[in-house]
Image: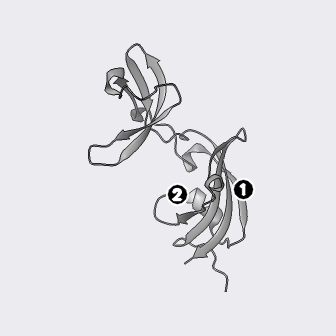
Amino acid sequence: MTNLVSSSSRVLADVTVKLKDGSIADSTKIGGKPTWLVMGDGSFSAAFEQYLFEKKAGDELVFELEAADAFGESNPDQIHFMDISQFPQDIELKEGAIIAFEQPGGGSVPGVIRQFQGSSVKVDFNHPLAGETVVFEIDIKDVRN
């Protein structure tokens, strides 16, 4: 019997994320390693998961999600100004660069350099695709329930 994607499935898939202009933002195909998508764990929006429900291994999907249902809207509270002296000397700072910032409790969070104003650097800690309408291309390899 073929497993269909349900609200508690684990789905092995190749996932490509494209911007509306067709440019590829990310793809598991580049590294040749599909990823596991865990339904119902809060990692994905209900709208995203809805496209996968009742699908099976071998299915290929292409769908578009507005920002709110994809990576969220850009939150102005996640944009901060930092003094340029707070950055290590060996990091090349340029607009659009994504830099990993260490968290106080361990781990790191990515920040995108958005702008320079004198000795201040505007850093955006929103997801790099926040505020973007994106197109997902998903090739389902395996479904485990």
Taking 53 as reference, is 130 above or below it? above
Residue 83 in the figure: left or right of residue 36: left
Secondary structure under badge 1?
strand
Question: Residue at horizontal 46%, vertical 39%?
Answer: 126
> Looking at the image, is mark 2 or mark 1 earlier in the sequence?
2
Q: Point out the image quarter for the N terminus.
A: bottom right
Taking 33 as reference, is 20 above or below it? above
Where in the figure is residue 78, as x and y percent of width and height?
Answer: 41, 35
Residue ID for mark 2: 44
Closer to the camera, 6 or 1?
1
Residue 36, numbered circle: none
Whole-number angstrom distance, CA of label 2 to CA of label 1? 16 Å
Residue 30 in the figure: left or right of residue 101: right
Question: Residue at horizontal 63%, vertical 79%?
Answer: 3
Residue ID for mark 1: 62
Where in the figure is residue 139, as x and y percent of width and height?
Answer: 69, 63
Q: Point out the image quarter for the C terminus.
A: bottom right
Closer to the camera, 66 or 9?
9
Question: Residue at horizontal 31%, vertical 43%?
Answer: 103
